[in-house]
Amino acid sequence: MTQAAGDPSDAGIIATSSSPHAQVVPVPIGRVTIGDGFWKPWMEANRTKGIPALLAQLEEHGVVDNFRLVSGRKKGERQGPVFTDSDLYKWMEGAALVLQSTDDAALKKSLHSIIDDVAAAQREDGYLNTFFTGELAGQRFRNLGSEHELYCAGHLFQAAVAHYRATGERTLLNVATRYADFMAANMGAGKIEQPDGHPEVEMALIELYRVTGKKDYLDLAGFYLKKQSYGENGQISGHAVRAAYLVAGAADYYSETGDSKARQAAEALWSDMATGRVYITGGLGARHEGEAIGERYELPNESAYAETCAAIANAMWNFRMLGNSGDAKYADMMERAFYNNVLSGISLDTTHWFYVNPLACFRDYQRSPWFGCTCCPTNAVRTLAAIPGYMYGVSDDAVWVHMYDSSAMDWRLGDGRKVKLEQKTRYPWDGRVEIAVSPANASEFELRLRVPGWCRSASCKVNGKAVKLEAKPGSYLAIRREWAPGDRVTLDLKMSVEMMASDPRVRTNLGKAAVQRGPLVYCFESTDNPEVDLAGVRLSGGSFTAKFVPDLLGGVVTLTGKGEQPSGGGQGPLYRPVDVDRRLPMTRVTLVGIPAYAWANRGNSQMIIWAPYKP
Amino acid sequence: MTQAAGDPSDAGIIATSSSPHAQVVPVPIGRVTIGDGFWKPWMEANRTKGIPALLAQLEEHGVVDNFRLVSGRKKGERQGPVFTDSDLYKWMEGAALVLQSTDDAALKKSLHSIIDDVAAAQREDGYLNTFFTGELAGQRFRNLGSEHELYCAGHLFQAAVAHYRATGERTLLNVATRYADFMAANMGAGKIEQPDGHPEVEMALIELYRVTGKKDYLDLAGFYLKKQSYGENGQISGHAVRAAYLVAGAADYYSETGDSKARQAAEALWSDMATGRVYITGGLGARHEGEAIGERYELPNESAYAETCAAIANAMWNFRMLGNSGDAKYADMMERAFYNNVLSGISLDTTHWFYVNPLACFRDYQRSPWFGCTCCPTNAVRTLAAIPGYMYGVSDDAVWVHMYDSSAMDWRLGDGRKVKLEQKTRYPWDGRVEIAVSPANASEFELRLRVPGWCRSASCKVNGKAVKLEAKPGSYLAIRREWAPGDRVTLDLKMSVEMMASDPRVRTNLGKAAVQRGPLVYCFESTDNPEVDLAGVRLSGGSFTAKFVPDLLGGVVTLTGKGEQPSGGGQGPLYRPVDVDRRLPMTRVTLVGIPAYAWANRGNSQMIIWAPYKP
């Protein structure tokens, strides 16, 4: 039932092989070795630059000191917003996730020092929150709707689980369970019954349950989930991060309980999101006001909110749905969010951050090293560290490849048979993937290779021989055979440049196209297009040429194509009959696109993703 | 030099034949008789319903009582925002303008009673503002940037001038001049030098100067105009109403002084507005925040502000520019604003009002009888009453027809020669205009007939014989001949249904068209299109059929054409390759358009003006 008795490093980033309703569970981060490919520079920068820089910021802004004030190790005034404990916890989770894949002694030392400060701030009864101390100690749990105590607790629990899985040490886990026990004793039906104003703790309590086997935690998560009206009307709305965390928690709850209402709600909300309320970048949140998801098809580009945290939440949500169903549509959405909106939130050196990720920009807008509300940077560092955990999955007699990157996996099927995969690919720059499959002993099982939804045509060979299976876009190609050590699989995902249109009800994108290649949405940035008027240019409808440029932005494929723009900076009256409009002189221009995630890494610029398209 | 010595009813709504730099001056309202045509029902409703209903609202909300409190005629607390005196003044101006064209004894009585209340509230020193009395009496003029004292004073002056021109009585004019004298004594260079936070008083002071000949008023207007940075960078921005009132004041200032800086500023700002910051409806103000004009080409439809007052201000600005230049482009803009954005602010029965005039609506949105800030309703009643004053103009040896409607004009050229025009037309439903020209004595002068910018082809006959002059769109067709009583002119303005495109930099309208016929912008309202998904429909590019429907919305020409929309409420993923998008099944639908001004008169509805257009 639980991992408590086993090796903690055997668990994936969520769920375990013992989650009874999970169809596919993740391979632990520690069992995936990232090779030389797309993600390695991001993860290395995160470990060596982003995480240290962010800790320095957290120290500078008093977020760590807040804990030292509570324990009496320091004197002074608490700093930062009510929820800022969660920022440190997310940093701790990120550090712990790094330690699951890399033995970084300096990082371990610095994490353990922080854990010591956190543990020292825990109250005797188990409560732990730096805001409700001193004069405010009597105000605990007074307003769970807006004061984020549950949210902070959740991030503590997730950090504790990550640390335990990384090291097997229970120092932080004990802090978490003491607090969770205190919560379970005081909250829930017949006790403090306020609903959770910022969902997060639901996922965290369930993860704590998975680690400890203590059903109180699962039940308290269930209490909060049922307090929310998620899925009542099947429409996702409100604060994007909260909405996605809530339904991610519901998906976790289903995986442990089989609660059909939770699953149905998660599916209904997913459909509503995926068919009408998500950006092409996987971003959620149309509105700055309330950081909120908008009406169906309300997806403005320049004024998009698309908070980095919301894209992370979207990926987390989809990964859980993928685990519950094995349906590749969730992997598509997760990949869309990771490559486009999550990464756009992070500078190439992982030291500067976007909170808001517009899909068009005509003003000076640059990433910052810190925010007063710094949720996104800390969320991003934990997410980069978790990437290996999203790549592979296992079920009873199948191994799944969800995301492609050069990497090695050394793990076991759900039924215990050991298998290694070694993957070589230049994905997402190229659609060719080579996988060496090495079971410990020759044995029949399935290799399930994701054929992304963006891929119109895929082919696969095993040991040089074509696999005669239909590779339907947005599915897993399931190759069942007796696998033997040394088997080699070659997957060719045809990676064309696609001009993408929106559902016409996305009114802001009417008549426009976005350029996509593989999982990457492209943008046109003024840096690469100094002669182009990005506010007036139209794509001419010809083809784009892809070229890998190693020295650009850490190495990216650029796309070069043709457009046209009004001559002389625009002529004619502001409004004119369409026949007059068609006769106005246009100038042909060359357009150079880069992956949208990489924009704003070279100083101030203008940027568009959607451009008028003339077929 | 001034009208002070002449018949006050000889002056038009602005300027006079003695404004030295005006090229064309308006014909007085009292010299224009509105016939059975487009404007008569609006003006009659305004006189018999709108004006009484609004006075009842002003009484109910304490706006009139505020004056009675100051004079001691009533006891109680002042009601409404700091600037609400101006609402009563605008109502008074509206009533006075009605009296210029209609001898309405009941209205005159009610206006005179209000004038008595206003006059009784004037302080001994001439000051008059119901906010800065009692405890606040010592705070006068403490903050001209935000407290609207000048704005209120300006509307008082305009009401006073209108009343004087209507009746020849000086009761309200004396109140105005006493206050203006007090202001001139206390404000200006070397005195109170604060700039004017909400321009309005500039136009009003200049009109007061035109009536009284007192140069102090013109100079004070000049002081405020020069305090503003209008035109410094040639870009119009900020609060739309304030911006347009300011530059309208600059245009007035030029007409009296020939100040070249004022004229250049007004022209530069106009070009910036007309080429990049005005809605197709003539509306100004893209943003709710700050009620502000946006960046160039920032013209969102659903979230448009396009305040009714701003469209009125735009018309007032353009009318002044037209007077200074005789350039028909200003008449085009004025007409665009009147027919589309000003009228959309008014219910057909003139008792309900829009403050904000979106160009697309997908939520419940209805006109209101009152607003906490009720500037728009009172502005609209004075504007409807002033319409006859915008129709005709005269210069030394020409008579100008700016706007077409069945009407008669009995006035004189600038050089004193008397002439009558009698105009018969169904404009804006039909482009045929018949004008009988009757000079008192046969004499050579020009009849200048406006050929609107929307009209691609016009022809003209005099006494049945074709006029061999090029009728260039957006110009005045100047027919110089010896006119004799009984001469008949027939102007045929070809009125086609035009599919209008935007400059491509208006990103929200890319790939879309708006349907226009004559001066009227059309909309599609769900009331007439119950089977159409207005959020997803595209115009098919075929022709629209015009039909006059007498029983609809007071009698309008509807336009019926074809469109298509995604079958079954939309299919396919939210984002799809353009070739897939093109193959998705569409259903053909019939679309019925009505003039955009007439929407929202039949209960809640959805509405679009711009729709995707497939040529």
Image: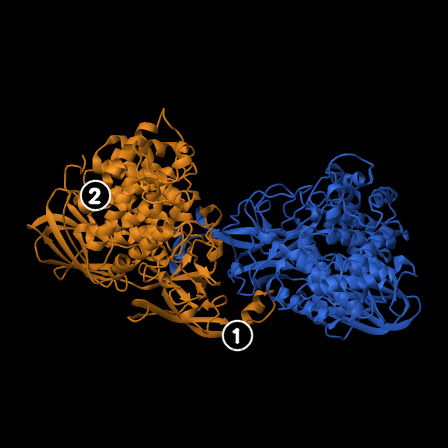
Chain colours: A blue, B orange
On whether disc 2 and disc 1 are found on a single subunit, the reply is: yes
- Would residue B556 be found to the left or right of residue B416 on screen? right
The residue depicted at 60 percent of the width and 46 percent of the height is A528
- Would residue A413 be found to the left or right of residue A344 on screen? right
Vertical position of residue A535 compared to residue A435: above or below: above
Residue A295 location, quadrant: bottom right
Read off the residue under disc 2: B164
**Tag 1, which secondary structure?**
helix
Amino acid type at circle 1 is: Ser
Q: Chain of mark 1?
A: B
Residue A496: % across, % down = 65, 62
The residue depicted at 88 percent of the width and 49 percent of the height is A171
Crowd band around label 2 with a 10 angstrom C-alpha radius: few (<14), some (14–19), many (20+): many
Vertical position of residue B181 compared to residue B63: above or below: above
Q: Chain of mark 2?
A: B
Residue B103 visible in the shown view: yes
Amino acid type at circle 2 is: Tyr
Residue B223: % across, % down = 34, 31
Q: What's the mark number on residue B567?
A: 1
**Tag 2, which secondary structure?**
helix
Q: What's the mark number on residue A424?
A: none
The residue depicted at 81 percent of the width and 51 percent of the height is A159
- Would residue B192 be found to the left or right of residue A615 on screen? left
Quadrant that contains the N terminus of chain B: top left
Viewer-nearest residue: A126 or A486: A126
